[in-house]
Image: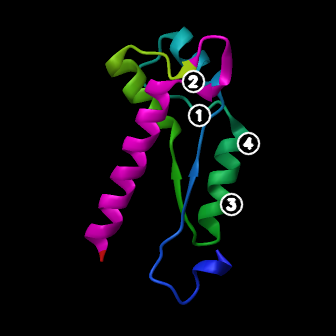
């Protein structure tokens, strides 16, 4: 964040969910993501309490997985995104960028 001072940059922190949280929500059949990862939720709360621009990727990812019916992780590795998961993350960043540009 220090490096952005005096520059026309805006730094946004995006919290990415653990695979276990998303896969657990899908296995339970919930249409809405229940915040099961208390560490992610606490990090989000702390980040925002400092007035930082923080985004939670988990609800967006869950919504897209339900809509598209695709696994966002590699089949044998639930810590890394598949091509679909990477695309969803890129779409999320683009949406954040567009909303930040509109605020200016």
Picture residue at 42% right of the left edge, 22% below the top: 65
Q: What element carries label 2?
A: helix
Taking depth in this image into account, of 68 and 34 the one nearest to the observer is 68
Question: For mark 3, what is the residue?
Answer: 46
Q: How crowded is mark 3: few (under 14 residues within 10 Å), some or many (20 or more)?
A: few
Taking depth in this image into account, of 24 and 101 the one nearest to the observer is 101
Question: For mark 4, what is the residue?
Answer: 39
Residue 4 location, quadrant: bottom right
Discs 2, 4 touching: Cβ within 8 Å? no
Q: Which one is closest to the eye, mark 2 or mark 4? A: 2
Question: For mark 2, what is the residue?
Answer: 22
Q: Which one is closest to the eye, mark 1 or mark 2? A: 2
Q: How crowded is mark 2: few (under 14 residues within 10 Å), some or many (20 or more)?
A: many
Question: In the current view of this chain or complex, which residue is farthest to the left?
Answer: 102
How far apart are the alpha carbons under marks 2 and 3? 22 Å
Q: Image height check: is 40 above or below 20?
A: below
The quarter of the image holding the C terminus is bottom left
How far across and how far down the image is residue 85, in percent? Answer: 48, 29
Q: Image height check: is 100 above or below 69?
A: below
Q: Which of marks 2 and 3 is nearer the N terminus?
A: 2
How far across and how far down the image is residue 51, in percent? Answer: 58, 72
Picture residue at 58% right of the left edge, 85% below the top: 5
Q: Which range of residues does the magenta coloring cover?
A: 74-103
How far apart are the alpha carbons under marks 3 and 4? 10 Å
Q: Earlier in the sequence, mark 3 or mark 4?
A: 4
Q: Is mark 1 on a helix, strand or loop?
A: loop
Question: For mark 1, what is the residue?
Answer: 35
Picture residue at 44% right of the left edge, 25% below the top: 84
How far apart are the alpha carbons under marks 1 and 3? 16 Å
């Amino acid at each position: 964040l220090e490096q952005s001072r005096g520059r026309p940059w805006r730094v946004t922190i995006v919290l990415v969910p653990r695979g276990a949280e998303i896969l657990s929500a899908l296995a339970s059949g919930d249409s809405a993501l229940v915040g099961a990862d208390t560490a992610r939720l606490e990090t989000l709360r702390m980040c925002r309490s400092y007035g930082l621009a923080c985004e939670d990727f988990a609800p967006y990812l869950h919504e897209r997985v339900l809509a598209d019916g695709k696994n966002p992780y590699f089949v044998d590795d639930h810590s890394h995104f598949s091509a679909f998961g990477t695309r969803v993350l890129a779409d999320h960043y683009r949406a954040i960028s567009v909303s930040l540009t509109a605020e200016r």
